[in-house]
Image (cartoon, rainbow, N blue to C red):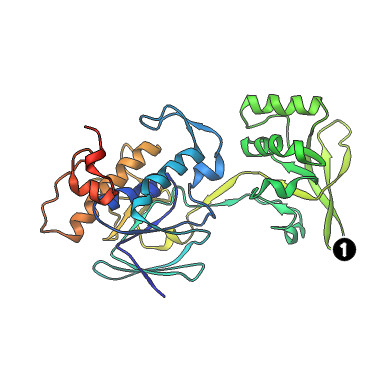
Amino acid sequence: MTIKTDVVIVGAGPVGLFQVFELGLQGLSACVIDALPQPGGQCTELYPDKPIFDIPAVPECTGQQLTDNLLKQISPFNPGMHLDQSVDTLEKRGEEDFYLKTSAGTEFECRAVVVAAGAGSFTPVRVRIPDIEKYENTQLLYRVRDPLQHAGKDIVVLGGGDSALDWAIQLAPAAKSLTLVNRTERFRAAQSSVDKLNAMAAAGEANVLMGTLNGFTEQDEILTGVSFTLRDEEKTQVTLPVDDLLVFFGLSPKLGPIEHWGFELERKMITIDLSTFETSVKGIFAIGDINTYKGKKKLILSGFHEAAMAAYAIKQQFEPDMKLNVQYTTTSPLMHERLGVDADTTTT
């Protein structure tokens, strides 16, 4: 069954989620599509527990907290959330008539599209060892979905960034053994995390090695060990027992199908009309890190502004003869109605 909505938003990062809110204030319905299995985009994929300090009126919050608050904020508008799938097909059939189909086979018809895909879809940088890919999603993992599934196991973590160290620190207490292997002695993580992991290693609660993965061992189609060349003078060869191999080499952004949707691009970013944030394709808008214009700043707060501007432009495009006045959520009865707020209980 084809899902019909006013606007389809491609991207469930903070900017895409806030777009739902701004469209809702205009009385427009929205569905959100994202390739990641959870909303939040880079915030929840790259730094869910790291603090963000530049959200207006929020002195400090984590990426996950920001996402949770945005989901709460947009809940009055009941957006359709379609996660773990990407948009494979986008067709413009006529004025205010778009058709989209995702990798999961979900089909949409809408009047406008907003691309809020950040730098594109993120795919993990994979291990380059022949044949090890057969263990992906069983013993070779590029993200931790449930920390409890790793308890009591021999864990090897590859990487030297925030994600690698954060998960190593969190998983080590419940693991049978945990070894983090970084390619060099230089870490790309917060110094506090490096210090904590080193302290755990000194106390025998974890192991830290510097080396390069060069092979693996298996038995009866089960991954049993991973082999490394250490970065010492002798280039020592070691093999570590492993139940779960967790790899955090980073994520690689790719535009994917977006690159072939007919937009005018500049350095793989979408150019827009700065007054409306509409792309070169009428009816399709682009906000957040995916767009570019003179003076562009890749900040979450800038993306929030762009979402508001796009929402007004979309409403005006749908109703060109209607005078569109700004209404404030503080005092507007219409805004209160759309937000499900009891005006009698609000403060002045």
The C terminus appears in which quarter of the rendering?
top left
Looking at the picture, how far across and down is residue 235, in whole percent?
Answer: 86, 36
Q: How many marks?
A: 1
Q: Nearer the viewer, residue 221 or 230?
A: 221
Q: Residue at x 80, y 31 (%)?
A: 205
Q: Is residue 312 above or below residue 174?
A: below
Q: Nearer the viewer, residue 181 or 146?
A: 146
Q: Is residue 335 left or right of residue 158?
A: left
Q: Residue at x 20, y 40 (%)?
A: 328
Looking at the picture, how far across and down is residue 25, in whole percent?
Answer: 26, 49
Looking at the picture, how far across and down is residue 269, in whole percent?
Answer: 40, 49
In which quadrant of the rendered view does residue 133 lie?
bottom right
In which quadrant of the rendered view does residue 289 lie?
top left
| Helix, strand or loop for disc 1 | loop
- Residue 287 in sight here: no
Q: What residue occupies the far bottom of the structure in this picture?
A: 1
Q: Nearer the viewer, residue 156 or 252?
A: 156
Q: Is residue 83 above or below residue 186?
A: below
Q: Residues within 10 Å of mark 1 (few under 14, many from 20)?
A: few
Looking at the picture, how far across and down is residue 122, in whole percent?
Answer: 54, 51
Please name the amino acid that badge 1 sits on.
Answer: Asp
- Residue 225 in sight here: yes
Q: Residue at x 77, y 60 (%)?
A: 131
Q: Which residue bears the numbered disc 1?
A: 220
Q: Residue at x 83, y 63 (%)?
A: 221
Q: Is residue 238 left or right of residue 66?
A: right
The N terminus appears in which quarter of the rendering?
bottom left
